[in-house]
Amino acid sequence: MHIRAKIKPNSKKGPLIIKTTDEKGEIWEIFLKSPAIEGKANKEVCELIAKNLKVAKTKVILAKGLKSKVKIFNIDI
């Protein structure tokens, strides 16, 4: 399973996931309180996705977009 996510670090709304669609299909907008420093935001995103899908954190893998706001995650279900 693949998930496209648009990450918004340093947000006052976070942690929050909003599922929307755009021209490429479904995209998750993820608001985080963590800053985008030293991978803290990426780690928190993986934890939120795992919690939302009710899978182990190790099943969520960042496939693309290590330093981008739009990321693609692979989930092994």
Image (cartoon, helix red, strand yellow):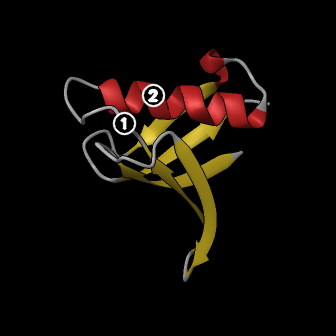
> Residue tagged by mark 1?
33
Give the farthest residue toward the front.
12
Q: Is residue 26 visible?
A: no
Residue 24 vs residue 44: left or right? right
- Name which residue lies at 67% across and 35% down: 75
Q: Is residue 47 above or below residue 27?
A: above
Mark 1: few, some, or many residues within 10 Å (few <14, many ≥20)?
some
Q: Which residue is mark 2?
A: 44
Q: Nearer the viewer, mark 1 or mark 2?
A: 1
Residue 57 is at least partly visible in this image: yes
Among numbered discs 1 and 2, the one appearing first in the sequence: 1
Residue at 40% x, 50% y is 7
Q: Is residue 69 depicted above or below 74 in this figure?
A: below
* Residue lying furthest bottom: 23
Q: Is residue 29 above or below residue 14?
A: below
Residue 20 locus on image (x, y percent): 62, 69
x then y, percent, for residue 12: 36, 46
Query: Which residue, as the protein is rendered here, is positioned at the far left?
Result: 37
Q: Does dot 2 land on a helix, a strand or a loop? A: helix
Amino acid type indicated by mark 1: Lys
> Between residues 43 and 61, which one lies in front from this camera angle?
43
Q: Residue at x 53, y 30 (%)?
A: 46
The quadrant of the rendering that contains the N terminus is top right
Any mark on residue 5, and which? none
Q: Secondary structure at mark 1?
A: loop
Q: Nearer the viewer, residue 14 or 19?
A: 14
- Whether residue 10 sits left or right of residue 51 in the image: it is left
